[in-house]
Image (cartoon, helix red, strand yellow):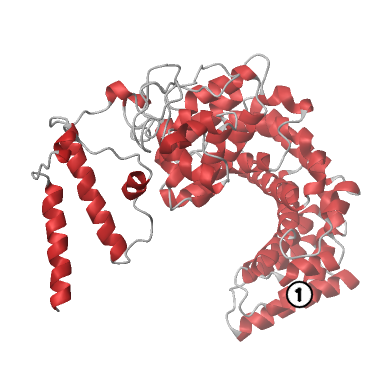
Amino acid sequence: MAALQQGPAKLAAVKGLVDKLRDDLKTPSLTTSQRDTALEELKVYGRDPRFADPLFTKEGIETLLQLAFSGGADSTAKNALRVLCNALVLKEQTRQMFIDLGYEGKACERLKNDDPDDEFLCSRLLFLTTYGTSVDLSALIEKHQLADTITKNLERHARLRSSGQVPSNPMVDMAMTESLKLLFNITHFATAHTAAFTSIIPPVVQLLSQMESATSKPLDPPVNFLINALLNLDLGSAEIHDALYPPDEPEGVAKHLINLLTKSTTAYHDAEYDMCLTPLLGVIRAVHEYAPAAVKASIRTQLLPTDKDRAQVLGTTASLSSWLLKNTTNPLAPKTREVIADLLYDMSDRDATTFVDNVGYGFASGYLFNKNIPIPASLTAEGGPQNDDGSGAGPAGSLSSSSQQSNTGNGGGGGGGSSSSRPVNPITGQFLDKERKPEGPEMTVAEKEREAERLFVLFERLRANGVISAENPLRTAVEQGQFEELEDEKKGSNSSDYDEEEEEERKGKGQKKKN
């Protein structure tokens, strides 16, 4: 190949190549080798769109399309397809040219060839046309059997992998990746036709179970594309039930997905979670939703807090369940925190009380509020949790001495990793007998009363200064006759810190009058 030109000389060279190829289509004069050489030069020039304008015109794109789909030499067709792919990547307007010239159907037909190069190139062409064009995906599915073609191609990849053969041609895995990307986009943009792709789920699941990332990132290609491909499909369809929950190992797929999640928690940074982990969590959620009872129980055992987790405040250990809980409040990963919260709520049988039992009110409260789900009655009565006998357990955050986990560990309920009935703190989810006790002596009744009085005065000062506008709950209690004065106060005890605070307040008011 001659030395590449730059600037205006490059522009002239590109125009000359396009004109030569277009003239050859009208009056053949070039050999196959000459055509291939010209296309190779165009491919190199086309990598940088500067001074390559003739390539991106309608005439230039049409010339390439005719060379790719006119039935000429296979090498010429593939070289033309490569130049086309580069053009559609670099110049968005060329994608609509491809559609306007009516070649998308021919690309679907060539995609049926059992050839990794054709699969790669035609899948990429069709994938690119799903962005910013008027492509009729319904027609491609109904008239050109695109769903069946992609399914057959992925079935071929699955058979190759299951035979134990490692493809020697790198184009094989690259072609599979392009098929998966095309699958995701079509099912995303043509939602009315997702049922046509249901039969593609078994080979995708089979490939996902067989393949591992070659890097330290467990969700690098092609694993991430296999996961993405499942997101828009109907995983609850009866016809593919055995693919997700094989009779010989119904928990196998779920375990593999959770294993990927476990590895991913340490392989990615917070800023990568939305892009990398959200699809995986979404697939796990769908697999859990349609799983048999035994598989649901297995998933919950692996993802919900266990007795070991409850030895500390939930979300503070190094377990997978703690990672999930911590990331329900991750400000750097809004999509991830949302899908995690949805998953945890699903694993609680979509019941608010069970949800609080499983993750603690501290983690559950935000989700319940955002979803307008009523707070469980046991947490609202008397301003906080209730004991089993119905009596109030005190203000929010106080400990429920009889609060027990509903976790049973059987897939029929909301139970998860914990099957203990030991009392827990309903706010933090920690076992009461594992909580750290205050090191100092417990406050006496008189000390508690003095502290309450101090808070009363401070509250009134804030309200008087306009800092807050809420009503003092202690004043409300006094007015409603719910506040009982201690005996030593009735006798005129003046040892309280409250007297000092009140005296200071009176002095402050007197000083204001003088001023």
Please state the horizontal and vertical placement of residue 94, each as a whole percent of the image: 74, 70
- Give percent across and percent down for residue 233: 72, 39
> From the viewer's perspective, is residue 510 above or below residue 302?
below
How many numbered marks appear? Answer: 1
Q: Nearer the viewer, residue 66 or 450?
A: 450
Q: Is residue 477 left or right of residue 289?
A: left
| Residue type marked 1 | Val
Query: How far across and down, in percent of the image, does residue 219 sit?
Result: 52, 41
User: Which image quadrant is residue 116 in?
Assistant: top right
What residue sits 36% from the left and 25% below the top? 310
Relative depth, front residue between 498 and 417 = 498
Return the x and y of residue 196 as percentages of the image width and height.
82, 40
Q: Is residue 335 above or below residue 504?
A: above
Residue at (69, 47) in percent of width and height:
184
Any part of residue 117 in sight: yes
Q: Residue furthest left?
A: 495
Instruction: Using residue 152 as the reference point, say whether residue 307 is left or right of it.
Output: left
Q: Quadrant of residue 399?
A: top left
Q: From the viewer's perspective, tell me whether residue 484 is left or right of residue 155.
A: left
Question: In the picture shown, does residue 380 fall above or below 334?
Answer: above
Q: Is residue 129 left or right of residue 450?
A: right
Which SS class for mark 1?
A: helix
Q: Which residue is mark 1?
A: 18
Q: Residues within 10 Å of mark 1 (few under 14, many from 20)?
A: many
Closer-to-camera residue (196/146): 196
Residue at position x 83%, y 51% in the image: 108
